[in-house]
Amino acid sequence: MDYYGFWQMLLDEISAAPKSTTERRIVTFNDARQYAGALSQWKALKKKRPGLRQVQVSPLIRAFFLPAAGAERLMDKFSDLLRIEDDLRIQVHSVSPDKSGTAVMPWGVKAIHAPQAWSKSTGVHVKIGVIDTGADYRHPDLKHSLASGVNLLHRGMLPLDDNGHGTHIAGTLAAAGGTRGMMGVAPRALVYPVKAFDHSGSAYVSDIVLGIDWCVQNKIDIINMSFGMKTRSKALHDVVIKAYRAGIAIIASSGNDGKRGGDYPARYPETIAVGALDRRHRVAAFSNRGPYIDVYGPGESVPSCWLREGYKEMSGTSMATSHVTGAAALLLALRPSLTPRELKLLLRRTASPVRLRKGQRRASLGGGAADALRLLRAGARAKPVAAAAKA
């Protein structure tokens, strides 16, 4: 393969394309050796060719992320060597912010019996990757809970939150404000914000792939993914499988359409899919549902940390997911060798029955309500599942 010609062709097309276009493509090499050759040539050329600095790379799935201009021509010439897919937009899973809140023990943290579990585990030393909008490092309830993480939108900068969603998720996960502030589900876990989403709560699939790639490289224990989209992505599924095989559990929100079915990546079998409960412990009206849901968590009017050292109530399967991720962190602190499959089975087995709305059948909803105390009790007794078992 002519690797120099490959990149020169792409450069020519980028130069000729309108500057206003923002569409991107994911280009994956079928052969590891050809990917390595293209990567080596790209590294050599990008120092002299500024246009190639727009290209990003994921070693985990042997993919390049590049402007749409040129991708189709690459496919015409190298169709037997490459797979090209659209780099789709993906959104965080929250309903519009409800109202300002105060520093309290959130109802969801109590609903999953996290305080009763703290005598057994507070999540100490568990590393949680939160692929989201970043986090507010100035928030007093988060100052002991946040690691440096990574900013995929502005490399070299802290992953500061300019939206609020990521800060809200981090608060539910691991806020440690004590009696004067808010307490999250796993207050001694360490949150690694992975800023992939912009101020509007939007990201490209390639940003998510790079975020998961970073989590695998940095040996994160568990990944919270409170976002989704309607369309399947082969690249996203590939990197989820890589993380799963690396022993990293991915907990993902199902979406807020109020329908049977749900969004990706929660629909992938390698993830732990989460739906939302209301304050009456019923499946929230906005929550997606169905047999693929592994577990439900509190998701209606959830108070948590917000920007400028504040608090806010929000609703969504995003909020439910952070409760479940926190409960999983409590267990992983006690059983760090648990596989993602074992964790999923324990979450499903220890969930409590949800309250049914009129006309609902339990089998149509999927899993039950997350319960951190039951999870820890069962996890302490559980025998390992065969490593070869599939999701």
Image (cartoon, grey):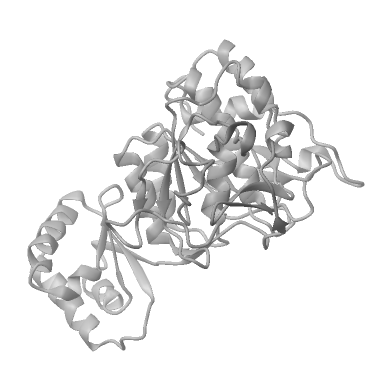
In the drawing, does residue 302 fall left or right of residue 306? right
Quarter location, residue 175? top right
Q: Which x, y percent locates residue 62?
A: 26, 53
Front-lying residue, 105 or 228: 105
Q: Residue at x 57, y 34 (%)?
A: 326
Q: Is residue 33 among what the camera can see?
A: yes
Q: Which x, y percent locates residue 391?
A: 51, 34
Q: Residue at x 46, y 49 (%)?
A: 138
Front-lying residue, 309 or 69: 309
Q: Residue at x 38, y 47 (%)?
A: 212
Front-lying residue, 85 or 336: 336
Q: Residue furthest front?
A: 180
Q: Is residue 72 above or below residue 225?
A: below
In the drawing, does residue 322 fall left or right of residue 282? left
Q: Quadrant of the N terminus?
A: bottom left
In the drawing, does residue 254 fall left or right of residue 7? right
